[in-house]
Amino acid sequence: MKSLKKVFIATAMTIFSLSSFAAQQLTEQQAKDLQPFKSITIRGAFYTDNDYVLAISKAADKEGAASFFITTTNISPSNDTLRIVYAKLYKADAPKAEEQTENLRKFEGVYEYPKSKAIRLEPFNVVRIRGYFPNEYDMNQAIAKEASTKGAYAFYIDSRSELGSNIQVAAYLFKKDAPERKLQPENAIPYDSEAGQQALAKGGDAAMQVEKPGYYSPSAFNEKFYADKFNNKVKVIEQPIDNTTKSTSTNTSKSDVSTMTSEPQRINRYTVTLPDGRKIQELNDATAAKMVAFDTIKFRGYYVTDQEISYQAGKRAIDAGAKYYHIARVSHDPNGPNITVFVDLYR
């Protein structure tokens, strides 16, 4: 994947190349200050950066745009000579991006972000602490104190788990000018699926429904990814935090840090893993509605939990050669405890 944000085209070349088109390319800062009216995507064989800039400019003209900003470009997995280019379009009178005032809580001089705001921003660090916190205020104070020492403008507590009488907390830290994360839509079609490739081939609005490689999950941070990225370990707080108590002792173990790949996660889907290591992901209703199943299977049995049903569905879907599956319907037997499960299969 290659992002245009990291590609600088000589000004003279850009002016010359775009002179035949009305829509002009915006810089990242210019685009940040404006509200787009539409997002588009194009797909084709572009051998230079200038080629796809010209193609997007031409497509923007057809949409009546005065300017455009290319958010990212991807190489097609089915053909490495093809690129998929995503861009936002702006009218000549595009309104300014709205800045909403927020009432945020503050601890130790550091703001607490709500999830709706934090999930859209890229953290510069992660704090993971473990200790005795008798109430939420003490926990927030402890996290904020750690965040303050690292120069954070804001924090967001993403997870907490009880370990005996102690609580382990993970929080993400943000600068005031934190860059935005590239998020997947919740109902995105899997990029490597048959339906995903067909949608990309169609281009336009269809391609915008496809999951974008390298984009983040819109519903959750990946603690393992960020802990590995920032080489972060769990810090043990031996005493409850107040204005006079200092945190002491850093107790870590190898289990506190998990090895991760360097790529951001895709959408967090429920995954079935078989004993032999084979895996398959379950699609939600909204995503499955955008795709066409190549087959539907059914099985019958007595299952107590949703996890049991999903495992049995995933196992059978893998054996049938599917990449993804969706539990379309569960029918309860009228005269017994068994159920019949109908599963759609997708490549």
Image: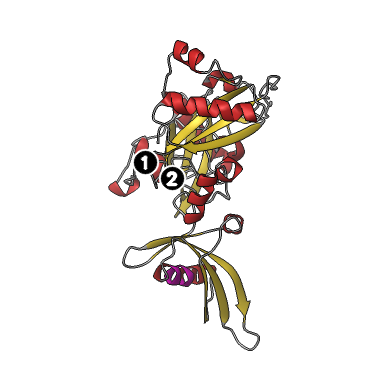
Amino acid residing under circle 1: Asp
Q: State whether residue 179 is above or below residue 294.
A: above
Closer to the camera: disc 2 or disc 1?
1
Q: Outermost residue, front direction? A: 20
How many neighbours does mark 1 have within 10 angstroms: few (below 14), some (14-19), or many (20 or more)?
few
Quadrant of res 116: top right
Magenta stretch containing residue 71, yes or no?
no
Q: Which residue is mark 1?
A: 80
Looking at the image, which residue is at 54% across and 29% down?
Answer: 56
Q: Which residue is mark 2?
A: 265
The region drawn magenta spans 312-317
Looking at the image, which residue is at 51% across and 13% down?
Answer: 15
Q: State whether residue 76 is above or below residue 27.
A: below
- Determine the CA span between mark 2 and mark 1: 22 Å
Q: State whether residue 98 is above or below residue 227.
A: above
Amino acid residing under circle 2: Gln
Q: Outermost residue, bottom direction? A: 335
In x, y percent, where is residue 331?
62, 77
